[in-house]
Amino acid sequence: MRANLTNPRTKQLKQVKIGFSWTTFFFGFWPALFRGDWLWALIGLIIQLIIGLPSYGIGASIYSILCAFIYNRIYINKLLRQGYHAADSAAKQILLSRHFTLYD
């Protein structure tokens, strides 16, 4: 499921996926890096290195699995706090049904 978010100041439109993050599941911290979410990319890299190196990569895989369940929610909440709003009524209903706090 996807929702469109728009920033009223910059008129930038972002389509965000709600729910499980398959890209985070397969690629770890890389999706955060490509989205420009520097903080979570750095957190993911550090955690994957700390856990992954001593466990020959198994710990990094565990991090990716766990983070795949929560990363999209973290990213959407970050955008909403930065001033993004639901672009249309359908997106607003989707966000409200998934218990996101809208800052209108």
Image: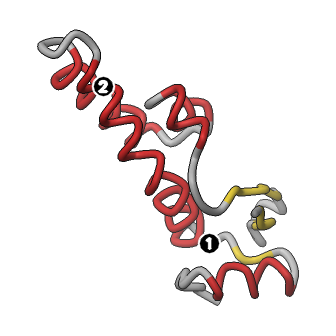
Separation of marks 2 and 1 at Cα, in angstroms: 33 Å
Residue type at mark 1 is Gly
Q: Which badge, 2 or 1, is on the more N-terminal residue?
A: 2
In the image, residue 104 lies at what x, y percent?
65, 89
Residue positioned 16% across, 23% down in the render: 50
- Using the rendered view, name the quadrant where residue 35 is placed: top right
Category of crowding for the residue at label 2, using alpha-carbon neighbours closer than 10 angstroms: few (below 14), some (14–19), many (at least 20): many
- The numbered dot on residue 83 is 1
In the image, residue 88 lies at what x, y percent?
87, 80
Is there CB contact under 8 Å for labels 2 and 1?
Answer: no
Residue annotated with mark 2: 60
Colour setting: secondary structure
Nearest to the observer: residue 89 or residue 103: 89
Nearest to the observer: residue 31 or residue 13: 31
> SS at mark 1?
loop
Residue type at mark 2 is Ala
